[in-house]
Image: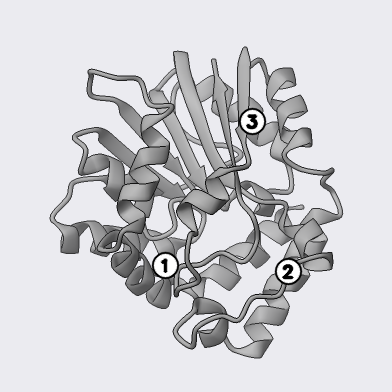
């Protein structure tokens, strides 16, 4: 299982530079406000929050929430992603803390954060149940985990065809990299059950008291087929401690 983690990190190390440029463009687009609108449904109101962006990539969510006045930290297993996250926050003039760290086994003390956020990460984790138990540990009582993800392994077998624009990331990634991404997806997916139903079960087993699922987020975020479009329908899972 550790081998697949290294494989995932290696793959994303090659995507980091282009990924930062795309996330900067996304930050300057209408998508920024759409993501914020989704967060506002779940974030505790009226105070500064300690937020951990797990699998931060180049820091999009960490920057988004830092700009709202929250104390944001981002972690990622890929050193190159963390380097670009630091650069992206600097470009945007925002303060966020970024660290190289394993999402399934972090270095933070118990009850360190009010909110955990993550995007397109859990599908890559070989031990999702372990991750959810770890994330429960990190949350303060009353805290919330907000997870945006999709059942990517299932989608590979039954994904609707979309005509993607030429500047879309899928068009810009070389064929051998696309093949590697699909291979990783299928290897990790072999250990997973249908999602998000399986996630709900695991989150309850991890101790979360209330778990909400929203499959409508996909149409709200990805209203048009542009360079940021995700051809796989995402869902939101909000789990409260």
Asked if marks 3 and 2 touch (Cβ < 8 Å), the reply is: no
Q: What residue did someone put label 3 on?
A: 132
**What percent of the width, then of the height, locates residue 146?**
50, 34
225 in relation to 41, above or below: below
Using the image as rendered, state which of residue 184 and residue 23 is in the foreground.
23
**Residue in view at x 13 percent, y 55 percent:** 93
Instruction: State the SS at label 3.
Output: helix
**Residue 53 image label:** none
**What percent of the width, then of the height, locates residue 197?**
77, 34
Q: What residue did someone put label 2 on?
A: 160
171 in relation to 185, above or below: below
**Residue in view at x 81 percent, y 63 percent:** 186
Of the two numbered discs 3 and 2 on the same chain, state the one appearing first in sequence.
Answer: 3
Q: Nearer the viewer, mark 1 or mark 3?
A: 3
Of the two numbered discs 1 and 3 on the same chain, state the one appearing first in sequence.
Answer: 1
Of the two numbered discs 2 and 1 on the same chain, state the one appearing first in sequence.
Answer: 1
Q: What residue did someone put label 1 on?
A: 80
- Spatial CA distance of label 3 from label 2 is 30 Å
Instruction: State the SS at label 1.
Output: helix
Instruction: State the SS at label 2.
Output: loop
């Amino acid at each position: 299982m550790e081998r697949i983690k290294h494989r995932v990190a290696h793959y994303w190390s090659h995507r980091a530079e282009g990924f930062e440029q795309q996330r900067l463009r996304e930050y300057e687009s209408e998508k920024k406000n759409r993501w914020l609108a989704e967060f506002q449904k779940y974030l505790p109101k009226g105070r500064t929050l300690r937020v951990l962006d797990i699998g931060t990539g180049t820091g999009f969510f960490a920057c988004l929430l830092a700009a709202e006045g929250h104390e944001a930290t981002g972690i990622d297993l890929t050193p190159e992603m963390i380097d670009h996250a630091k650069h992206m926050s600097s470009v945007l003039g925002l303060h966020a803390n970024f660290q190289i760290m394993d999402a399934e086994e972090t270095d933070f003390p118990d009850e360190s954060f009010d909110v955990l956020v993550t995007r397109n990460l859990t599908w890559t984790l070989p031990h999702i149940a372990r991750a959810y138990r770890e994330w429960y540990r990190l949350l303060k009582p009353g805290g919330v985990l907000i997870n945006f993800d999709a059942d990517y392994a299932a989608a590979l077998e039954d994904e609707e065809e979309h005509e993607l624009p030429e500047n879309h990331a899928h068009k810009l990634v070389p064929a051998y990299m696309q093949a590697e991404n699909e291979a990783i997806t299928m290897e990790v997916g072999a250990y997973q059950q249908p999602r998000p139903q399986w996630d709900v079960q695991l989150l309850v087993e991890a101790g979360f008291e209330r778990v909400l699922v929203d499959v409508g987020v996909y149409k709200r975020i990805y209203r048009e087929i542009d360079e940021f479009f995700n051809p796989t329908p995402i869902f939101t899972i909000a789990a409260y401690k």
